[in-house]
Image (cartoon, rainbow, N blue to C red):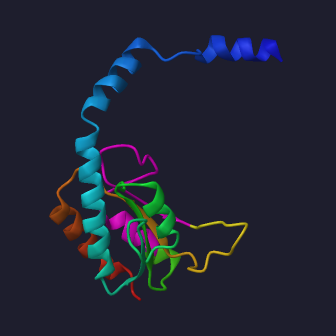
Amino acid sequence: MGVKIRQTTFSFGDKSGSQEVFLALRGLRTLKMPMEHFDLAGRDMAEWFGRQPKVKTVLHPAFASCPEHANWKRDFTGAAGLFGIVFQPCSDAQIRAFVEALHHFGIGVSWGGYESLVLPVKPVRNATPWPEGDQLVRFNIGLEDLDTLKADVAAALPLLNT
């Protein structure tokens, strides 16, 4: 086993590089500012989604209506810009068309960046069944202007013929 570990260490390294450490330390000094923005922007956008008739459920941990909110409240003092939206029943093709029509959201799962992202997901749960079907779309709200993001989503919502 030691040979495999040694080969992996030689191939990938076992320490962070000095440039990566420098960038991480530099980012920590100002981390509070973007995190506060992500929290406020995510809550604002999630509340906006909650007022849209094509939205069935908003899954944001900071909202009392979200399952496990009590655990979030116990363990956290803020949230990020990540939340889920369950749309009223519609087809997979409509969800795909909606996501592809968004111009100010990238499609992806890199939730740690500064850009706004969207990703349709099909939850798989082993312990308990997912009660909402396949209409879940995850959003990560980044540093973009909220009015621009809302207008982008509003323009795409008609593609969900619910």
Taking the view exactly as shown, the residue that stands out farthest to the front is 74
Q: Quadrant of the C terminus?
A: bottom left
x, y percent for residue 2: 80, 13
Taking the view exactly as shown, the residue that stands out farthest to the right is 1
Above or below, comparing residue 149 to residue 90 in the picture? above
Instruction: Confirm whether residue 76 shows in the render.
Output: yes
Q: Residue at x 50, y 76 (%)?
A: 135
Residue span colored magenta: 95-121
- Look at the image and say whether residue 89 sits in the magenta stretch: no
- Horizontal relation, residue 86 to residue 143: left or right: right
- Horizontal relation, residue 28 to residue 107: left or right: left
Q: Residue at x 28, y 70 (%)?
A: 153
- Horizontal relation, residue 136 to residue 46: left or right: right
Q: Quadrant of residue 39?
A: bottom left
- Between 93 and 42, the one lying in front of the other is 42
Q: Quadrant of residue 56?
A: bottom left
Q: Residue at x 50, y 80 (%)?
A: 91
x, y percent for residue 63: 38, 71
x, y percent for residue 96: 45, 69
Total marks shown come to 0
Q: Quadrant of the N terminus?
A: top right
- Between 127 and 143, the one lying in front of the other is 127
x, y percent for residue 148: 17, 62
Q: Residue at x 40, y 71 (%)?
A: 97
Q: Quadrant of residue 158?
A: bottom left
Instruction: Confirm whether residue 156 shows in the render.
Output: no
Above or below, comparing residue 31 to residue 15 in the picture? below
- Look at the image and say whether residue 96 sits in the magenta stretch: yes
Above or below, comparing residue 81 to residue 156 in the picture? above
Above or below, comparing residue 61 to residue 20 in the picture? below
